[in-house]
Structures are given as structure tokens and as C-alpha cells.
Image (cartoon, rainbow, N blue to C red):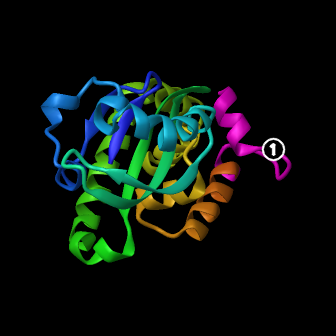
Amino acid sequence: MLCIDSNYHIRFMNQSFKHCFHVEENHLLNQHMHELFGEEQFQKYIKDDIAQCLKGTLLNSICFLKDHTGVKKNINLEYIPFSRKSDIQGFILLFRMGNEAKNKTINNGWAEYEELKQQIDFQLQTHYEEFKRRLKIQYPNLTHKDLTHCSLIRMNLSTEEAARYFNINPTSVQKKRIRLKKKLSLSHKDDLIEFLFAF
């Protein structure tokens, strides 16, 4: 997993990524992504997808990428944008290896989830405390989880991404959102996402 800002600079990488691509974090933090993948791979496989992601689009792509030793790896890339208010601040890039390597990396799944959760928690603590404070004042019946869920929605995370964060299924997230609308005194016709972005 990588966390990239809107200028394509690397801000965070987890242990699984460093192991997979044989890189050292201290050499690449704050560097442009083409320093990691090379200009040719960046232009060919990654740049256009990033442009779409920074417009708020969640997307997946499959490609062969070379690590620093020159070995090609079959990688599924998942681009997850995150935002502050209505502005996209950057994105999280998840790397999933092809079927031939899954058995080697399956034990890293829980650790990857924990690191992803920590990264989102960091964004919540850094950018959304004031938003949660204002919500709590106006709607004191909201629980801590309700406030977190509202913040995830405002971060532009999808139902599936919120489900991963809470470690529940997407159907449960949808039910939570219905309950949230009631707590926020929204009608059936009101759009929860629009309301939270405008709050």
C-alpha cells in the first residue's frame, strides 16, 4: 500500500509493499512516483489512472510492473481517493499480487488492513476533528461510530471502502446509513452524501 498526495509524491508505504518491490522507505518518501516505478512505467500504466482517481473516481487496473531488481510482477492496482471537505487531497494505492503469488502474501492481509485503517485514522484525526465536533453539537445523539462514519462519507469513501474500514459487509454499511439519515432528521428524499459535504 502507498499513500500519495495530489502532486504524485509518496507520503507513506507499508511493509508489504517494501518487501514486494524491494525498496527502502527512507529513499522514496516525499519523492515523485516515477522515482519508484521509472518514467516509462509511470507514463504507460499509472499516470492516466491517477488523473481519474484525483477527480474522485475509485478504480482498479491490472498490469505487469517491474520492481527495482527488474523482475516483472502481475499486480492488481486499486486507487482509492481521499478528500478534505470537497477537495481531493490524494489517494491510497493498494497493490494485490496475481494468483500465482497469493499463497505467499495471504498472511499479510490482516497487517495490510491494520495499516490501511491506521492511515485513514490519521486522516480523520488530522482533518476531520472540527467536522465531527460541529456535527456532535448540532446532533448530540450521534455516537462516536456515527461521527466516524459521517467523516468517512465526507472523505469520499465508498460503501465497500467503509465496510473494509469497519470490518463489516457492505449491506451493514447501507443499513447504518439509513439509520444515520434518521438521526440527522433527513427525509427519504434527502441525499446523505450531499448533506454531509455541505455541512
Q: Residue at x 55, y 46 (%)?
A: 157
Give the amino acid type for the residue marked by disc 1 in the picture.
Asp
The magenta region covers 182-199
Residue 121 appears left or right of 57: left
x then y, percent, for residue 37:
33, 39
x then y, percent, for residue 185:
73, 44
Q: Is residue 188 magenta?
A: yes
Q: Which residue is mark 1?
A: 190
Dot 1, how many residues are within 10 Å of its Cα: few (below 14), some (14-19), or many (20+)?
few
Q: Residue at x 27, y 36 (%)?
A: 12
- Depth check: 170 or 68 in front? 68
- Depth check: 70 or 45 in front? 70
Q: Residue at x 63, y 55 (%)?
A: 177
What SS does tag 1 mark? loop
Picture layout, residue 124 above or below residue 30: below
Q: How many numbered discs sit on the rendered protein? A: 1
Picture layout, residue 133 above or below residue 57: above
Residue 58 appears left or right of 162: right
Which quadrant: the C terminus? top right
x then y, percent, for residue 167:
41, 64
Q: Is residue 37 magenta?
A: no
Camera sees residue 167: yes
x then y, percent, for residue 121:
34, 41
Q: Quadrant of residue 110?
A: bottom left
Residue 40 appears left or right of 107: right
Picture layout, residue 154 above or below residue 142: above
Camera sees residue 185: no
